[in-house]
Amino acid sequence: AELDKTAAVVPESTALVPAPVDIANKLRYLFGRNGDYTVADAYQGTSWSVREKLIDSFNKTHEHWKKEDPKFIYYLSAEFLMGRSLINTVYNLGLEGEYAEALNQLGYEMEKVADAERDAALGNGGLGRLAACFLDSIATLDLPGWGYGIRYKYGMFKQALKNGYQVELPDIWLTKGNPWELRRDDVKFEVGFGGRVERRKQGNKEVTVWTPSEKVVAQAYDNPIPGFNTPTTSNLRLWDAVPLTEFDLSAFNAGDYDRAMLERERAEGISAVLYPNDSTPEGKELRLKQQYFFVCASLQDVLSRFKAVHGNNFDLLPEKACFQLNDTHPTIAVAELMRLLLDVEGLDWDQVWTITTKCLNYTNHTVMPEALEKWPVKVMAKMLPRHMEIIEVINEGWTKWLGGHLNDLAPEERTKRIAAMSIIHENPWNKEEMLVNMAYLAVVGSSAVNGVAAIHSNIVKDEIFNDFYQIFPSKFQNKTNGVTPRRWLAWCNPELASLITGTLGTSEWINDTEKLAGLRAYASDKAFQAKWAAVKKAKKAKLAELIKKVHGDEVNQNALFDIQIKRIHEYKRQYLNVLSIIWRYKQLKKMSPEERKKAVARVCVIGGKAASAYDMAKRIIRLVTAVGDVINKDPETKEYLRLYFLPDYNVSLAETIIPAAELSQHISTAGTEASGTSNMKFQMNGCLIIGTWDGANIEIAEETGIDNVFVFGVRAEEITQLRKERKNFKTDPRWDELMRDIEGGMFGDKDYFKPLVDSVNNMKVGNDWFLLANDFASYLKAQEDVDACYKDQSEWLRRSIMYTAGSGKFSSDRTIREYAEDIWHVTPSRPTA
Ligand code: 73E
């Protein structure tokens, strides 16, 4: 008999079950635990309980959006560096009181329980973390929007130290299950690779048919993203690669078993590992496969939802969906959207080109020339033959159009310019090879192109894409990065948050960071400064505890906590930081005990991962640990100077380090760091900055008051000339001394450090491309200014308060509002609570 469906009572939510009971229930029925819980259990029980509230909110939001059918923004990114979810979810949903209380009743402390969670580390660094902050803001601002990416089985490697050298260990993060995801067994798409392309007659029309030689299935996992102070919970949809045969059990007959297993391995390989490379992408075929895999699944998913509502009215697509390409990694979307609309939906070229370019937008994140992705035509033609054809046709049309547009140029000049702007071009290092320039494809295929900080967007316009900018000036924009003030101030530094709220008389700053400017009125107030200092002190004590745990050392908690945490890269110049620490050490050694007592004591912390194949970066890590080994043991100076390398820098470590920092270092060669985002997190937490005139440092200095920031070094405009003149540069005698020290074995490992020394001195090897020697003297001078300022604690605290007060601009809410208004044209749509 037919079931009477209306009779089924679906409880609206689990809200009526008290949290402690619910946690115990989850442990009993999901894990078979009955009392006697470990902290890890408490984490599991709590998370699975919170998950249900999250899903309730997710469902409400999506029912609402389904009804309203607003325009959506889809953020396509190969990386989402989410970090931990429990605290963020509980606080964003406003459940912190309830769950803290529940855990107390069970005998646990929320903070300790939260510590049992593993980071979701599906990203390398700034680019991936930016994507995560953007999702938080998109949800908080009630913007209809989703993230789309890859559910890597192994995320960013875990970094360990062995005798002071980096070793990489796999990030096995899913083994204990993941309460923050929801597998959608009904959402799967096929993704093909290789094979051949044919034209066939279909009635009086010629159609193109691509028959891939290999197919895999993309399986959707949803990761609900709760907004703060709103009923909106949006979504990050990640794709897992599984074999086709999982559908088709008949392939598992006796003879095919081996083959079926091989197929499984091949399929699963696609979403197995994140490429652990930051700022320079790896030109490996598997990486192109990953890119196409998630782009293809995401576009099919969006089109299938669109068609369910609007049928074949594809001209409406740009009014219902837009895609942001997070760097060039998802750029194959240009060709894939064309293919789906041309070959699958049967529209014609001009219509499809119009729709595609209206729907796509591209963000550039780096100026490093080696970072602009280029795929050999041969590789692409083999893996994605139909896409290669489409790109060829796009390029033909493009270069032809250019020819007309550049009519005024002399013929030779015109030919040269067209060649320089061609999406497909010769490999300058190997004339035999043709390359597809993915950045050019993204620029030509998008409505808007943006950089990530003011200076960077100018470099994008004036240098890397200048030819394109001259033709399409209005296509180019700036969207200065931001970070979520929820994770990076309110939740990671509740002590400071409550002082701010108490002082401003409102917590509205969490959604409206411009309100932080109200703190300026208190910057010189002694009583307020004392409270501000007490918070910093408590956070420093926490970091000191961590250093003790990792290195076994007690550190002087009255010392200046001086931090540099970011990926290890020559352009970020951790090496320069180490040189100044060695210099400081040598000065301390020369002082009498009385003189030393007057010196500013420092605890220096450096953290960050080196890409596994990045040899020079690994040597820099070893230099840090070797220098630390000498300095930290020296009985004469150890009260005054320490240097620790904190291994396995990740999101959750950052949440402990940043609130404790008093000085942070952002010292890239001017013109090399597109933006930086940790600088914003430090600023929010009242940490002073020593930095170059680069990336977002510039805007941070403008907002904070330039005199409050320790700025040093040459300017971006000077770099080209300085590089030309580098051969004749007269190095500082102090620099020469330090080079001799390292070469002479002051920190051991002479041979291993030799290439490092050479890279900044020897013209044959490195030519000091990042101009450490040029900035060395002004850097030491800025460090002296830091010391002088720290001696005047009231001035230091005033500045610290001015940093937080000036951080309003750097909320990712501001950034996302700008994207929404200037690029996406999406508007808020909030479900009722
Ligand atoms: O300056 C940062 C920027 O703040 C930049 O280096 C970083 O993106 C951040 C967010 O905008 C970045 N990462 C990459 N390119 N730029 C990158 C490139 C290839 C693979 C992985 C990451």
Image (cartoon, rainbow, N blue to C red):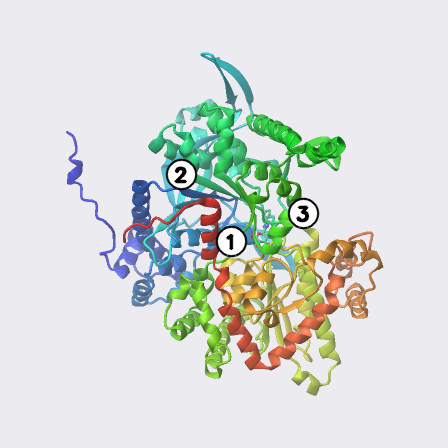
Q: Amino acid at mark 2?
A: Lys
Left or right side of 237 for 587: right
| Distance between mark 2 and mark 3 Cα atoms | 34 Å
Whether label 2 lies within 8 Å of ligand 1 gets the answer: no
Secondary structure under tag 1 reads helix
Q: Secondary structure at mark 3?
A: helix
Observer-side mark, 1 or 3, equals 3
Cα distance between the residues tagged 1 and 3? 26 Å
Q: Nearer the viewer, residue 454 or 98?
A: 454
The residue carrying mark 3 is: 463
720 to 103, vertically: above or below: above
| SS type, badge 2 | helix
Give the percent coordinates (x, y) of residue 364: 58, 47
Look at the image and tell me whether residue 615 can be seen. Answer: yes
**Residue 654 numbered tag:** none
Name the outermost residue toward the bottom: 594
Type of residue at label 1?
Arg
Q: Quadrant of the C terminus?
A: bottom left
Which sits earlier in the primary sequence, circle 1 or circle 3? Answer: 1
Which residue is pictured at 42% across the width and 34% down the height?
A: 317
Q: Is residue 682 left or right of residue 33?
A: right
The N terminus lies in quadrant: top left
Q: Position of residue 359 (x, y in %)?
A: 48, 38
Q: Amino acid at mark 3?
A: Glu
**Circle 1 is placed at which residue position?**
129
> How busy is the neighbourhood of tag 2: few (under 14 within 10 Å), some, or many (20 plus)?
some
Label pair 1/2, CB-CB below 8 angstroms:
no
- The answer to which of marks 2 and 3 sits earlier in the sequence is 2
Please say if 402 is above or below 779: above
Q: Residues within 10 Å of mark 1 (few under 14, many from 20)?
A: many
